[in-house]
């Protein structure tokens, strides 16, 4: 049996009358990209929030490397190895690209206490940050203020910041949204090589990217996983076609 | 647009040149005014760490200013009455030594900031403002009733406290002490802003959930910033008490908390020299307009309105443009 990096067991969450996560059990195995697809409002981001610890489930568990992390804060889960990108960019807009990336590395590589040394002159931090920026292709805009980046560049920066944690598993919420075809192609290549370092739970609406990348796909509709399988299995699944894919399959 | 570092050097030069000129033409009162401005500047530089870098709008910083003031008042009062502060379990005497008084002021205001910060950082936004205000008011009313130390009337200290090797009664020498402390504090704050701590604090203001995702404890970072901020404002309070040789509950008033915010806003929130420019402008207006009309605050209000409406980043923002990014 292969070791499982990340797993949820029966995660359940309701918002009033809306059952936004209905007994969700999915897992992430070494070396894979597990895509999570589903219509708008299906509960994908809500599921990610529970996995990452920003939202508490009503029932169920989250396990990282076989360890129950259900009661750890988001901060502790990051340190335990969950590297997350946000659907809505969570970046310090007044700061530069490099500053945002150095900040990402700070918790894992450095510490913010008892030093008046400039953060950007800390070679360890800066090394990690610059390497991450090279990998996503933002090396030429390192000293640009984040507010001045294009939407696509902000998506790339989200990924770079997650890279700095050197995580055990990546959780990415729509990293390709708004990237444009050139940007999606670049990021698809990056994710393809990244899965070897750490498996990726990928929420994505861009079906070309999903079909090109995913080892497995889970389909979430109205808070329920209606199918999990390989690309071919999912494309052939009638229920999935009706609920989400339509003609795209 | 003038580069901000050039403008900062210009302000520092003014802080040296004006008192030097005042001594040359024998205008000691100008030196005293400048001392007042420099001490307000220190208090506001302290607030700017919480407000500008941390985004923590504290309407209670007078608490720390007052604690610094009373640290000086109480220590010096016991020295001038020859009555020890404690006799049991061990004897603690008063003192007239500035360095000792500063140390006590810094430690006491840090502790107060730690407690106030722990409680008020559980909230945010307008609740944070109200809780800090409430704490300031608690100190204010406590001191009004604290008859051992003058209650409402406050405490007068007959002779300014001493500093080894200097004659602190000479206005220019006392000014030099205050100016040196301001310079030191500015240097620390500028280093702090660029440090890893400053980076995290700055980001915690903009996107707290990102800072947590980076594995950092946002609240702890903000609390540390609040403590450093309170400590610096407390030190300013001790100097202010020494300038006036007098402390009273007015040092704890919410109006004073408001004025410290006004210094920061006039000069530029989050700008290193913003609080310095704000305090200078405030003291200048207070002196010039205050001589013309009792209602000079109206003009101050008008200035504040113009700055808030038409500039992002106070007077420094007007002169130097947007804040440059570090590289
Ligand atoms: N805090 C909340 N309180 C109440 N309802 C919420 C809350 N957060 C999300 N919802 C609702 O839960 C449902 C699922 O939202 P979620 O953001 O998880 O969807 P999603 O699958 O990520 O959609 P999208 O593809 O548009 O990103 C939506 O109907 C949303 O309105
Ligand atoms: Mg979503």
Image: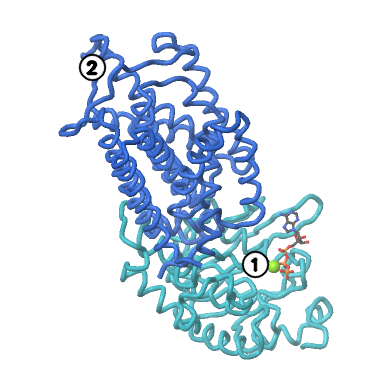
Chain colours: A cyan, B blue
| Most foreground residue, A84 or A98 | A98
Mark 2 burial class by Cα count in 10 Å: few <14, some 14-19, many 20+: some
Q: Does A91 sit above or below residue B125? A: below
The residue shown at (29%, 20%) is B75
Residue B39 position in % (x across, y down): 39, 37
Residue A32 position in % (x across, y down): 54, 80
Residue A181: image quadrant is bottom right
Give SS at disc 1.
Answer: loop
| Figure label count | 2
The residue shown at (59%, 40%) is B123
Q: Which residue is mark 1?
A: A88
Residue A50: image quadrant is bottom right
Give SS at disc 2.
Answer: loop
Say the numbered circle drawn on residue B320.
none
Residue A8: image quadrant is bottom right
| Chain label for disc 1 | A
Q: Is mark 2 within 8 Å of ligand 1?
A: no
The residue shown at (69%, 82%) is A206
| Most foreground residue, A173 or B282 | B282
Q: Tell which tag, 1 or 2, sits nearer the viewer.
A: 2
Q: CA distance from mark 1 to mark 2?
A: 58 Å
The residue shown at (44%, 62%) is B4
Q: Does B114 sit above or below residue B77? A: below
The reply, left or right, for residue A182 in relation to residue A222 is left
| Chain label for disc 2 | B
Residue A12 position in % (x across, y down): 69, 56
Q: Does B312 sit above or below residue A184? A: above
Residue A65 position in % (x across, y down): 46, 65
The reply, left or right, for residue B134 in relation to residue A180 is left
| Most foreground residue, A191 or B21 | B21
Q: Which residue is mark 2?
A: B92
């Amino acid at each position: 049996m292969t070791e499982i990096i990340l797993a949820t067991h029966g995660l359940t969450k309701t918002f009033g009358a809306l059952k936004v996560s209905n007994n969700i059990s999915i897992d992430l195995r070494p070396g894979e990209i597990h895509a999570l697809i589903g219509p708008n409002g299906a509960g994908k981001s809500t599921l990610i929030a529970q996995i990452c610890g920003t939202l508490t489930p009503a029932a169920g568990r989250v396990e990282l490397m076989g360890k129950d992390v259900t009661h750890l804060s988001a901060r502790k889960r990051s340190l335990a190895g969950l590297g997350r990108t946000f659907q809505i960019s969570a970046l310090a807009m007044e700061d530069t690209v490099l500053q945002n990336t150095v900040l990402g590395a700070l918790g894992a590589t450095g510490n913010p206490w008892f030093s008046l040394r400039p953060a950007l002159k800390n070679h360890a931090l800066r090394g990690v940050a610059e390497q991450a920026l090279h990998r996503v292709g933002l090396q030429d805009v390192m000293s640009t203020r984040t507010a001045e980046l294009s939407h696509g560049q902000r998506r790339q920066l989200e990924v770079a910041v997650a890279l700095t944690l050197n995580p055990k598993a990546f959780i990415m919420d729509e990293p390709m949204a708004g990237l444009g075809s050139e940007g999606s192609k670049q990021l698809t290549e990056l994710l393809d090589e990244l899965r070897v370092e750490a498996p990726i739970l990928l929420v994505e609406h861009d079906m070309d990217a999903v079909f090109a990348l995913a080892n497995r796909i889970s389909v979430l509709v109205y808070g329920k996983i209606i199918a999990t399988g390989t690309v071919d299995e999912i494309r052939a699944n009638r229920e999935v076609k009706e609920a989400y894919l339509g003609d795209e399959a | 647009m003038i580069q901000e570092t050039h403008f900062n050097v210009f302000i520092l030069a003014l802080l040296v040149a004006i008192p030097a000129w005042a001594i040359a033409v024998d205008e000691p009162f100008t030196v005293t005014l400048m001392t007042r401005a420099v001490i307000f500047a220190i208090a506001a530089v302290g607030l700017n760490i919480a407000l500008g870098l941390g985004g923590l709008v504290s309407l209670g910083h007078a608490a720390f200013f007052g604690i610094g003031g009373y640290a000086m008042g109480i220590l010096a009062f016991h020295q001038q009455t020859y009555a020890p502060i404690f006799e049991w379990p061990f004897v603690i005497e008063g003192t007239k030594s500035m360095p000792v008084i500063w140390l006590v002021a810094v430690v006491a205001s840090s502790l107060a900031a730690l407690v106030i910060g722990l409680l008020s950082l559980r909230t945010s936004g307008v609740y944070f403002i109200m809780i800090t205000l409430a704490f300031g008011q608690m100190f204010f009313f406590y001191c009004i009733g604290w008859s051992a130390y003058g209650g409402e009337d406050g405490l007068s200290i007959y002779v300014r406290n001493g500093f080894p090797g200097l004659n602190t009664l000479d206005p220019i020498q006392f000014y030099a002490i205050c100016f040196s402390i301001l310079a030191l504090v500015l240097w620390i704050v500028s280093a702090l802003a660029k440090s890893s701590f400053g980076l995290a604090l700055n980001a915690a203001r903009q996107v707290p959930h990102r800072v947590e995702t980076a594995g950092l404890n946002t609240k702890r970072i903000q609390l540390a910033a609040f403590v450093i901020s309170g400590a610096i404002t407390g030190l300013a309070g001790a100097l202010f008490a020494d300038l006036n040789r007098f402390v009273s509950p007015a040092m704890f008033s919410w109006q004073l908390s408001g004025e410290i915010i006004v210094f920061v806003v006039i000069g530029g929130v989050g700008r290193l020299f913003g609080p310095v420019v704000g305090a200078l402008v405030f003291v200048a207006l207070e002196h010039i307009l205050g001589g013309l009309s009792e209602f000079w605050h109206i003009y101050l209000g008008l200035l504040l309105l113009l700055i808030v409406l038409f500039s992002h980043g106070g007077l420094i923002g007007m002169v130097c443009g947007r804040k440059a990014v570090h590289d």
